[in-house]
Image (cartoon, rainbow, N blue to C red):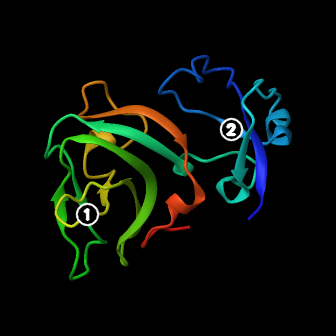
Amino acid sequence: MANITVYQYRVPDQPGINLRGSQPRYGTRAAIERIGQAPLPDTALELDEGLLDANGFTRHEYLTYRIHIKHSHAYAGWTVPAGTSAGARLPVMGGDYDARLTERMFDPASGAVRCLRVVGANQRAGGDLWVRLDDTAELARFPEVPVDAALVINGRRLSEPGELAAPGLVE
């Protein structure tokens, strides 16, 4: 896919949008102008066009979050989709990780569910763990998490296209 230039912009009802830890908003110049806003100066970024939605904006699931898990065993994730013989549910150990929002097929009967792919969290075999967002109330609205949650978001960045490919990812 081709690279396309996107820009960060302010959302009028969210003045702190560009603060550390706040959700970055990017879009093509045409998309930003279409909603009556202006691209912020010095925020141009070359981005693979596959990371944009049909309206020309990046989507939440194309962000990589830098998270800190305060203590072990606060969350558990699956090594592979549940219902397969190789799948295991393992605790996510405390520490710092990259994480991405995905949709994952855990059971063909119930379809894909939203989850957080915690990169490198499988302490036993290496690899990632997929934490279902519907497993705990504090993660249900991720990336909005309560202040007292066991997970802290320390930053966000746009994901590289190669980072997004994963078995079971619903496109």
In the image, farthest residue toward the left: 73
Residue 26 numbered tag: 2
Q: Is residue 142 visible?
A: no
Pointer 2 or 1: first along the chain? 2
Mark 1 residue crowding within 10 angstroms, few (<14) / some (14–19) / many (20+): few
Whole-percent x and y of residue 2? Answer: 77, 60
Between 53 and 120, which is closer to the camera in this rendering?
120
Callout count: 2
Residue kind at label 2, given as amino acid type: Tyr
Of the residues shown, which amino acid type is indicated by label 1? Gly
Secondary element type, mark 2: strand
Do residues under tags 2 and 1 come within 8 Å of each other at their CB atoms?
no
Q: Is residue 96 above or below residue 51?
A: above
92 w.r.t. 15: above or below: below
Q: Give residue 148's quadrant in the image.
A: top left
The residue at 40%/66% (across/down) is 104
Residue 128 in which image quadrant: bottom left
| Horizontal side, residue 67 vs residue 82: left or right | right
Can you give x and y, in whole percent of width and height, for residue 100 in the image? 44, 51
Q: CA distance from mark 2 to mark 1?
A: 33 Å
Few, some or many C-alpha atoms within 10 Å of disc 2 (few <14, some 14-19, many ≥20)?
many
Classify mark 1: helix, strand or loop.
Answer: loop
Residue 126: numbered disc: 1
Is 68 left or right of 10, judged from the image as shown?
Answer: left
Residue in the picture at 30% in, 71% down: 80
